[in-house]
Amino acid sequence: MAERTIAIDAFGSDRSPEIEIEAAVLAARKGHRIILVGDQRRLERGLERHDDGRLSRLPLTLHHAPSIITMDDSPARSIRAKPDASMPVAFKLVKEGKAQAVVSAGNSGAMLACGLFKFGRIKGVDRPAIVSSIPGPKGSCVLLDMGANVDCRPLNIVQFAVMGATFAAVASGCSRPRVGILANGSEATKGTELTRAADRLLRAHPSQHFHYCGYVEGGDLFSGDLDVAVTDGFTGNIALKSMEATARALIQLVREEIGGRRLGKIGAALMVPALRSLKKRIDPDSYGGAPLLGVDGIAIICHGGSTAKAMVSAIDLATRYVDQGLTPGLHEAIRGHAELFAAAKGEGEKNES
C-alpha cells in the first residue's frame, strides 16, 4: 500500500488549533503522514506542548496559511476573498498532489465551496452530497444528502442513490447495496412530487450495481434491511440532528433512572461491559466525519465540536477511502448510469415546461 498524506485544516474546529494539533500528533504516531495547514507560528507554539523528544521524527509537517475562514463567513465569498486561508490551502495541496485527502472541522458550506472550486465536480455530477453512516443493531445505513442541497430535483436524488451505493460498497463492502428513498410511508402514493418522480426513474432504470427497494421510512434506517437511504438535504439534515438529539436524550434518561434508584446502581454495575460496548457503537468520535461525495477528490467534513479522537477517526477514514479507490469508483458509477441521468434530466425539463 502506497503512503498517503492527509492535509488537515488546523483552524476549523470550535477549539482550533489545539484539537487539530493534538489530532495531527496522534495520527502521525499511528503512522499517518500529515500536513498541518495554518498559521505556522501558532502551530509551532502549539506543537511544543506535545514534544516528548520524538516529535521531530514523526511524519508531520507544517504548511503556512495565515488566514482563517470562520463559521460566520459567507462560503463562496470567503473562498475568493481568503485564498490563503487554511481550508482552501489544504484543498490546494490535494489538487497539486502533495496530499491525497483533506480533513476539516470548519464551515461545511465553505468545505462544499472548496470542493467545487478547488477539486471540481466529477464529470456528470450535478450536485455533490454530504453522506453519513447511521449505526444500527445489524449494521450501518448510509444517509445522504445531509445538508448540502436543500432544494433538489429528481436528477439529484437518483445521483445520490448511485453515489450512496458506491460509497456503501467501499465503506461496508456491500456487493449490491440496498437503496431506498426516505419518505413518509412505504406506499407508492406517499411522498412528494420530487420523491415520486425519483421513484419512477429508479424503477424504470434498474441498476446492476445496487438493488432499489422503493420508499423507506425512518425506522428502516435501523432495521439492517437497508444499506442506503437518499433524500434532499433539508430532510436529511433534520433526520440526522433528530436522531443525534434522541440518542443524547435516551442516554441522559438512563443515567437519571439508574442514579435515582439504589437497585438501579447495582444493576448498572452488572451492565458496565454492555454499556461500554453500546457507548462505543454510538460514540460520534468513532465515526470521525462525513465525506463530500461528487467532487473530484476526498474531503472529510468533521463536526465543529469534534474531539481530537474524532478527527483521528476522520483521518483513518480519509486514508481508507483513498486506498480503496472511492473517487475512481464514483467516476465509474456516474459513467455507468448515463441513461438513468439522461431520463432524469428529461423529467426535470418536462416539469419545468
Image: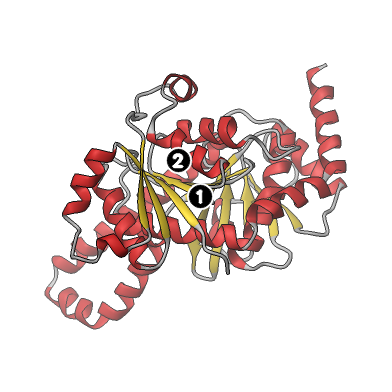
Q: Quick check: 8 left or right of 176?
A: left
The residue positioned 32% from the left and 56% from the top of the image is 23
Task: Tell me the SS state at disc 2.
Answer: helix
How far apart are labels 2 and 1 at the CA level?
8 Å
The residue positioned 32% from the left and 31% from the top of the image is 66
Q: Which residue is mark 2?
A: 90
Q: Quick check: 106 left or right of 187?
A: left
Q: Is residue 101 above or below residue 137?
A: above
Q: Quick check: 222 left or right of 7?
A: right
Tell me residue 314's x, y (percent): 43, 55
**Mark 1 residue type:** Ala
Mark 2 neighbour class, 10 Å CA radius: few under 14, some 14 to 19, many 20 or more: many
**Mark 2 residue type:** Ala
User: How many numbered discs, if any?
Assistant: 2
Tell me residue 316's x, y (percent): 45, 61
Task: Tell me the SS state at disc 1.
Answer: loop
Image disc number at residue 99: 1
Q: Residue furthest bottom?
A: 270
Question: Contact (CB < 8 A) between labels 2 and 1?
Answer: yes
Tell me residue 68's x, y (percent): 33, 30
Tell me residue 172's x, y (percent): 60, 66
Frontmost residue, 36 versus 117: 36
Q: Is residue 261 above or below residue 156?
A: below
- Please state, as top left, top right, bottom left or bottom right, where the C terminus lies in the image: top right
Frontmost residue, 91 versus 163: 91
- Please state, as top left, top right, bottom left or bottom right, where the N terminus lies in the image: bottom right
The residue positioned 52% from the left and 63% from the top of the image is 3
Frontmost residue, 324 versus 28: 28
Q: How is the image coloured?
A: secondary structure
